[in-house]
Every structure is written in C-alpha cells, then in structure tokens.
Image (cartoon, helix red, strand yellow):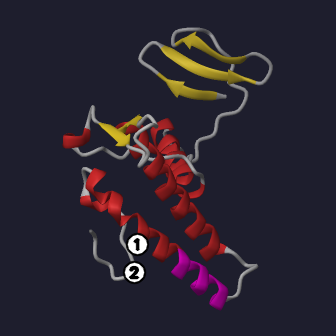
C-alpha cells in the first residue's frame, strides 16, 4: 500500500518487508487502486491526541514552570535541635514533587468522577476531601510561575 508520496518517491508499506521507498519513475504493478476519498490523519495529529490522552488519564507530570525568583535556590530544613544538621534540598526538586502531587490529585479526581462503582454521594464526599487537600497545598502557590497552575482551595481563593 502506498502510504506517502514525495516529489521523488512512493513510500510503500509491504506486509512482509515493512516500508520501502520506490522511485517515482519505477515500473510498478498496481494491484488495486482505491479512488474514494480516504480519511487520513497526520502523525502530528496522532501525537497531539496521544499526548492529550496521557495527560488526562495517566500520572505523567506536565511541564509547569517554577517562578523565576526560586530558580537555583535551595530549601533548608533547620531542625530545632542545634546538634542536628540542616537538610538542604534544591527548590526545583521540591517543586517537581509538589507538581507531581497536584497532577496525581487531578488524575484521582478524574477517576472518581468517571467511576461507575461509586454513588453520586460518595463522589461528592471524595471530591470535598480532594478540594480540602488542594486548600492545604495553597501554601506552595508562591513557587508557581503561572497563577493558572496554582492550587485552589475550598473558597476558590488562592493564597
């Protein structure tokens, strides 16, 4: 089957040998020609669709930018006991973990809302718990570059 045509070649997919290119001027035998309009989709379209599906239904973390003022910074956890050493963590690593938590909460929301095993009341109850979790995480909104990526709590206000 011819799957693509360039100015110099036919791209032909063979069942036994895969895809090969054949010069346009070559003597080839057409076994069956389909003249009807064929519904095609580009690789780019397929890639976009698959990316959207993965974002929606998996725990793949989306690329969320860290606020400029925190780039290259460190989070220092200082113990109350002066005999203990502080723990230093790159803010970017900490931020990545926060974004993963946010994305996994979103996936959990989608799974709850699409579940046929939960009653409507159970879905509402679980959604309220998730909303409260978002509210607890608003403390970290200062790390996000874009307000649209931030957590929103119970009252719909961002802090």
The secondary element bearing badge 1 is classed as helix
Which residue corresponds to the image point at 47% horizontal and 76% vertical from the top-left? 132
Residue 86 falls left or right of residue 49: left
Percent x, y of residue 52: 49, 52
Whether residue 126 appears in magenta in the rendering, the answer is yes
Residue 106 falls left or right of residue 93: right
Residue 39 in view, yes or no: no
| Distance (Cα) linking label 1 and label 2 | 6 Å
Which residue corresponds to the image point at 47% horizontal and 46% vertical from the top-left? 97
Which residue corresponds to the image point at 28% horizontal and 70% vertical from the top-left? 158
Residue 27 in view, yes or no: yes
Between 41 and 3, the one lying in front of the other is: 41
Query: Looking at the image, which residue sits at the far right?
Result: 16
Between 36 and 14, the one lying in front of the other is: 14
- The magenta span reads 120-129
Which residue corresponds to the image point at 56% horizontal and 49% vertical from the top-left? 54
Label 2 environment density (alpha carbons within 10 Å; few <14, some 14–19, many ≥20): some
Disc number placed over residue 67 in the picture, else none: none
Percent x, y of residue 10: 55, 19
Tag 1 near tag 2, CB within 8 Å: yes
Q: Quadrant of residue 122?
A: bottom right
Percent x, y of residue 111: 63, 68
Quadrant housing the C terminus:
bottom left
Magenta highlight: main SS: helix
* Residue labelled with disc 1: 135
* Residue labelled with disc 2: 154
Whether residue 90 appears in magenta in the rendering, the answer is no
Compared with residue 124, is residue 107 higher up or lower down, i.e. above or below? Answer: above
Residue 27 falls left or right of residue 89: right
């Amino acid at each position: 089957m011819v799957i693509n045509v360039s100015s110099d070649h036919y791209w032909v997919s063979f069942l036994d040998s895969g895809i090969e290119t054949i010069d346009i001027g070559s003597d080839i035998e057409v076994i069956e020609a389909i003249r009807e309009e064929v519904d095609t989709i580009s690789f780019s379209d397929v890639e976009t669709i698959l990316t959207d599906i993965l974002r929606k239904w998996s725990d793949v973390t989306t690329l969320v930018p860290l606020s400029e003022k925190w780039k290259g910074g460190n989070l220092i956890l200082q113990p109350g006991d002066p005999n203990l050493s502080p723990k230093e963590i790159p803010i970017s690593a900490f931020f990545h973990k926060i974004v993963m938590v946010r994305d996994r909460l979103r996936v959990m929301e989608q799974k709850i809302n699409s579940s046929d095993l939960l009653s409507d009341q159970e879905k509402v109850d679980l959604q309220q718990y998730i909303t409260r979790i978002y509210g607890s995480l608003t403390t970290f909104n200062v790390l996000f570059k874009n307000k649209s990526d931030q957590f929103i709590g119970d009252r719909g206000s961002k802090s």
